[in-house]
Image (cartoon, helix red, strand yellow):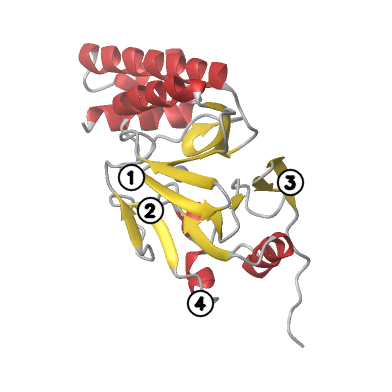
């Protein structure tokens, strides 16, 4: 007998915007934006997730054609792409430098607006390098109200940001651009963790700037043992080490 999954439950953030309920397997925040003609699924999750349950959850809310958006190329965000393509999904959007092999449509430096029907739109934008070389944010606005922004791993709540593929000094600037959009967007959904506000973005940016400054100074002072700075970098030892490595490699 075919496996009939319990559908993933989506929690409603706004009239057209949903988030897969926390605790639904992957730890990645899976977003869903529903228009009359199209449903946009943002970061459908890792390859070992329960994709059938995710798809069933979407289908409980909408029968519209599904478009997939990947905020970046890390496996825990894009692993479900192949399953969804096999289920008939024809469009997968990602940044041109995200390295997503299953992507069908690439975003460059020019933002792309996906019109979903019924006045609902999702704007995909690359605000500069940061967590990776190919990060996208996905903004949803309806009317004049401040909208919801899906930020991928450019924003991390509850844990340190991940630096292993990052461009730390550019990331600081990218966070500044994201923060400056706070007039149009009032709610920010990170790739992992709970929703945050503009103040959180500002403090994440300040801390990262401080981390970059301390690390760069340590690299200048002691080229062979910059790791001595780890205790004064405002992150845990593992991420501090990655931050130094990435700053050294620039
Ligand atoms: Zn990531």
Mark 3 element type: strand
Please report contact status of discs 3 and 1: CB closer than 8 Å, yes or no.
no
Mark 2 CB lies closer than 8 A to ligand 1:
no
Give the vertical position of 218 relative to 12 (above or below).
above
Image disc number at residue 134: 1
Mark 2–mark 4 distance (CA, rounded to whole Å):
18 Å
Instruction: Name the N-terminal-most of marks 2 and 1.
Output: 2
**Distance between the alpha carbons at the discs numbered 3 and 4:** 26 Å
**Residue at 65%, 33% in the rendered image:** 194
Which is nearer the eye, 45 or 107?
Answer: 107
* Mark 3 neighbour density, 10 Å: few (under 14) some (14–19) many (20 or more): some
Q: Which residue is mark 2?
A: 94
Q: Tell me, yes or no, whether the two marked residues, 3 and 4, touch with CB atoms within 8 Å.
A: no
Name the residue tied to disc 3: 11
- Quadrant containing the N terminus is bottom right
Residue nearest the observer in this picture, 249 or 168: 168
Closer to the chain start, of discs 2 and 3, is 3
Name the disc covering residue 86, or none: 4
The residue mark sitting in front, 3 or 1, is: 3
Query: Which is nearer the N-term, disc 2 or disc 4?
Result: 4
Q: Where residue 149 sits: x, y (%)?
A: 53, 35
């Amino acid at each position: 007998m075919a496996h009939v999954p319990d559908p993933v439950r989506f929690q409603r953030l706004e009239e057209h915007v949903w988030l897969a309920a926390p605790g639904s397997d992957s730890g990645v925040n899976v977003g869903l934006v529903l228009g009359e003609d199209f449903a946009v699924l943002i970061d459908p999750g890792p390859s070992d997730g329960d994709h059938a349950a995710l798809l069933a959850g979407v289908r409980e809310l909408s029968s519209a054609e599904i478009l997939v958006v990947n905020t970046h190329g890390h496996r825990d965000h894009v692993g479900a792409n192949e399953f969804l393509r096999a289920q008939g999904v024809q469009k997968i959007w990602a940044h041109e430098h995200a390295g997503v092999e299953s992507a069908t449509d690439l975003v460059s430096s020019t933002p792309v607006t996906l019109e979903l029907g019924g006045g609902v739109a999702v704007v995909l934008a690359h605000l500069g390098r940061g967590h990776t070389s190919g990060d996208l944010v996905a903004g949803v606005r309806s009317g004049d109200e401040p909208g919801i922004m899906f930020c991928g791993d450019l924003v991390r709540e509850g844990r340190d940001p991940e630096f292993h593929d990052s461009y730390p000094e550019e990331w600081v600037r990218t966070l500044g651009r994201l923060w400056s959009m706070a007039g149009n967007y009032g709610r920010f959904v990170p790739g992992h963790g709970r929703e945050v506000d503009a103040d959180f973005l500002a403090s994440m940016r300040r801390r990262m700037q401080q981390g970059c400054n301390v690390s760069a100074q340590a690299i200048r002072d002691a080229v062979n043992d910059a790791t001595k700075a780890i205790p004064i970098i405002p992150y845990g030892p593992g991420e501090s080490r990655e931050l130094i490595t990435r700053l050294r490699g620039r």
